């Protein structure tokens, strides 16, 4: 029996980076994997084949997590295809960095819509089926930046801090229904998102990390697997930091 054998997981933003690693880790551990992507259509289609190689059912959906109605449609489609959703992982996220002096209203709105509103959209859409099933695990991807703040990322930090408050509230509201809700706060993980940073900034980050290296997407996915599985049945309302000891 594998860790999440036959559980159905829905992961948003899995065409690359951390989401892709999460989809792989769950497939390897026996889950059936539904995932979304938006602009990376070819990568999304390739991921289905990658996941099916583990001998599980997998399907990709092109869906914009920031749109309320699209989230409802997505959840209905996943339930029609897979029968249930046991684990939701709200991973989709973007950055639109800039100092507040220069940040446009559009940069602010886009980040809040994609990073924070998406978490509301998807969570709202899955809680009815999870309540009916009397169980569920919701995992929201926040960030070290949501806890600490970061110059040049006021929009991103606000969206990620919002996710932590949302996570605790959902845990309080739905604990009695056996639905758990936790957040993961990655530190510096080497993906396309952090690939946009300049070399000097990356070296500064690494110096400040006790483990003296950036994290791998699979190391975030491992913690997701723990929170999605029955190894964490008494864990809810928490933010788990996966950051190599940064800011400890
Ligand atoms: P990434 O490599 O940029 O990947 C982002 C993923 O989100 C892509 O699959 C993208 O899909 C998807 N996405 C973006 N907008 C979307 C939308 N509106 N609807 C659906 N999917 C959407 O980012 P990452 O580094 O893997 O980050 C994943 C999550 O971890 C994010 O929430 C990020 O904030 C968080 N995080 C990352 C780090 C880090 O160091 N990398 C640290 C802390 C937290 P398409 O390509 O198809 O558009």
Image (cartoon, rainbow, N blue to C red):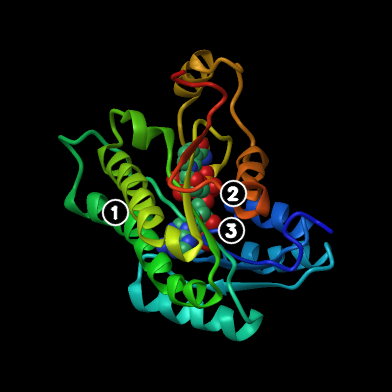
Q: Quadrant of residue 11?
A: bottom right
* Residue depicted at x 60% and y 16%: 212
Q: Nearer the viewer, residue 225 or 169?
A: 169
User: In which quadrant will I find the N terminus?
Assistant: bottom right
Q: Which structural element holds mark 3?
A: loop
Which residue has dot 3 on it?
14
Residue found at x 42% / y 78%:
72
Residue 60, quarter of picture: bottom right
Which residue is outermost to the bottom?
Answer: 80
Dot 3 surroundings within 10 Å: few (below 14), some, or many (20 or more)?
A: many
82 or 195, which is in the foreground? 82
Q: Is residue 33 visible?
A: yes
Instruction: Report if the beta carbon of the residue with label 3 is closer than 8 angstroms to ligand 1.
Output: yes
Q: Please give left or right for residue 212 compared with residue 39 in the image.
A: right
Q: Which residue is mark 2?
A: 227
Residue placed under numbered mark 1 in the picture = 112
């Amino acid at each position: 029996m594998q860790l999440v054998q036959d559980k159905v997981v829905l992961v948003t933003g899995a065409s690359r980076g951390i989401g892709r690693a999460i989809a792989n880790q769950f497939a390897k551990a026996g889950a059936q994997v539904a995932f979304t992507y938006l602009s990376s259509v070819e990568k999304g289609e390739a991921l289905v084949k990658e996941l099916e190689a583990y001998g599980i059912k997998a399907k990709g959906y092109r869906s914009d997590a920031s749109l309320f109605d699209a989230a409802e449609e997505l959840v209905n489609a996943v339930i029609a295809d897979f029968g249930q959703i046991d684990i939701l992982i709200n991973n989709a996220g973007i950055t639109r960095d800039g100092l507040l002096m220069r940040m446009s209203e559009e940069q602010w709105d886009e980040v809040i819509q994609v990073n924070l509103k998406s978490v509301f959209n998807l969570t709202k859409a899955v809680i009815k089926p999870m309540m009916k099933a009397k169980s569920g695990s919701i995992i929201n991807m926040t960030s070290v930046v949501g806890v600490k703040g970061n110059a040049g990322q006021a929009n991103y930090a606000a969206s990620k801090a919002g996710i932590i408050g949302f996570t605790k509230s959902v845990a309080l509201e739905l604990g009695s229904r056996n639905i758990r809700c936790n957040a993961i706060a990655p530190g510096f993980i080497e993906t396309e998102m952090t690939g946009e940073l300049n070399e000097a900034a990356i070296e500064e980050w690494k110096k400040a990390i006790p483990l003296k290296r950036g994290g791998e997407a699979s190391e975030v996915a491992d913690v997701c697997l723990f929170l999605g599985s029955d190894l964490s049945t008494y864990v809810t309302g928490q933010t788990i930091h996966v950051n190599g000891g940064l800011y400890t």
